[in-house]
Image (spheres, rainbow, N blue to C red):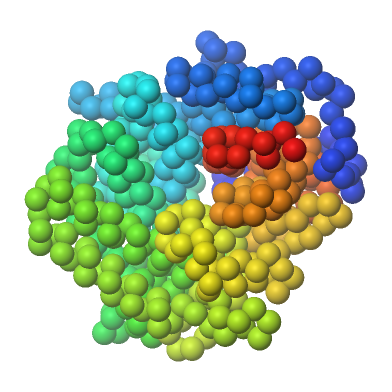
Amino acid sequence: MKRSDFIQRAGLLSAGLLFNQNLFASVADWSSLRPVPSKRNFKSKAVEAAIEQFKAGVKDKELAWLFENCFPNTLDTTVFFSQDNGLPDTYVITGDIDAMWLRDSCAQVWPYLTFLKQDEELKNMVAGVINRQMKCILKDPYANAFYKDGNKESEWKNDHTDMKPGVHERKWEIDSLCYPIRLAYHYWKRTGDTAPFNNTFKSAIALILQVFTAQQRKNGNRGEYHFQRETLKPTDTLPMDGYGFPVKPTGLICSMFRPSDDATTYSFLIPSNFFAVVSLKQAAEMVKAIFNDDPLAGKLNLLATEVETALQKHAMVNHPKFGKIYAFEVDGFGNVNLMDDANIPGLLSLPYLGAVPVNDPVYQNTRSFVLSDSNPYYYQGQSLSGVGGPHVGKADMIWPLSIICRGLTSIDDSEIKLCIRMLKGSHAGTGFMHESFNKNNPADFTRKWFAWANTIFGEFLWETYQAKPHLLNA
């Protein structure tokens, strides 16, 4: 089923509860909510040691409990590790959907990279994610989600696009091809291991370059990708024969869907183009150093420069209140969409992805815009606030991802503490993060089992514990 169909309602709290109240008498012993060890999908000695270290060092029992539940959630429940022709192979589901999103699977295992040198089995598991992702990209570089079984037919098999067996969904999103590069690059930098970087990997990089170039849509050529779905939800399909609204070529890359899997309004999606610049440069560095392929590296760098130049020319607008900010989407004709969505990449997350410095004045202006009522998807409740989006189909639903991302990109201790307090107040007694929750009633939430939100919340807590542990006990 599609993500928005997994709407979970929990009658645990009444509306309007404040996040600083002690509401969870039923879990006062803070017993772990993890599966018993024999039922965990994957075990990491390094992650277990980090959990014990955090629990010993953080006096706030609720935070320690949340960290223990959330940080290993990807390993406990969503990772399926095996071997394929002697190579590591890792299939990662999102949680309540048995499919592997290229974006989510990368983001889910990303927080474990810091432990790879301490845990050989964990390193092999991440190498398996890289191996599987590259095979998925070669199967269909325009698809966003895949099945473990390469012959399985999707519930979306009747979408009006070039669906293939083994593909769960075929929504073209730039970030779907950026995330695997990000994971592979940082795996390489942290471990020095080049085992996953074989001919399959290099072929996938070359195909990514080909797709990015085609989706610049120059010379009136819309490219081969088109998509339409018979649906009552307008953000699940594309207009204009499935090619989306027109764009005027600028050097930017079209993304027909956002990281939320919602259709773009104007398909030059600015956060994803920033992400593409980073990823192209990383791919070029790897191709040159590992494969000694200067021509391919040169083409990757050339495209990165072209997109970067186009961003400088087309991504910024003058806002009457906030000054120069980054737009969310543009079309090359001068039309802009000023908003932000809770998903990553979004405007708020640009420093987290290494796309802009956190102290970039335009980013700081943009951040102020995103976290204000000038952003149509910023919601302020009685005690909780954050960014949502159209994906869940109704207003006033804040995504924990946005609060987590706000904390990860903050340089203000008081703001980091605020984010931690709000996240503590959002789990509605469940001990886990969710896809979204009502701004005045966290018990009204979507997706009871959403591993990305759980694990990146753990990442936020772990990074805070490493850098500023006093904020966790404030």
Placement of the N terminus among the 4 image quadrants: top right
Depicted 108 relative to depicted 222: above or below: above
The image position of residue 256, as x and y in percent, is: 44, 67
Q: Looking at the image, which residue sits at the far bottom?
A: 333
Left or right of residue 358, residue 30 in this image: right
Left or right of residue 356, residue 448 in this image: right
**Residue found at x 49% / y 53%:** 352
Left or right of residue 147, residue 233 in this image: right
Placement of the C terminus among the 4 image quadrants: top right
Asked whether residue 136 appears in the rendered view, the answer is no
Q: Looking at the image, which residue sits at the far top?
A: 38
Asked whether residue 331 appears in the rendered view, the answer is yes
**So how many labels did they put on this image?**
0
**Residue found at x 60% / y 82%:** 323
Depicted 437 relative to depicted 98: above or below: below
* Quarter of image, res 149: top left
Depicted 455 relative to depicted 327: above or below: above
The image position of residue 171, as x and y in percent, is: 44, 58
**Residue found at x 40% / y 83%:** 313
The image position of residue 84, as x and y in percent, is: 25, 27
Compare residues 156 and 70 and report the one nearer the observer. 70
Compare residues 116 and 16 and report the one nearer the observer. 116
The image position of residue 216, as x and y in percent, is: 32, 74
**Residue found at x 45% / y 21%:** 46
Left or right of residue 286, residue 335 in this image: right
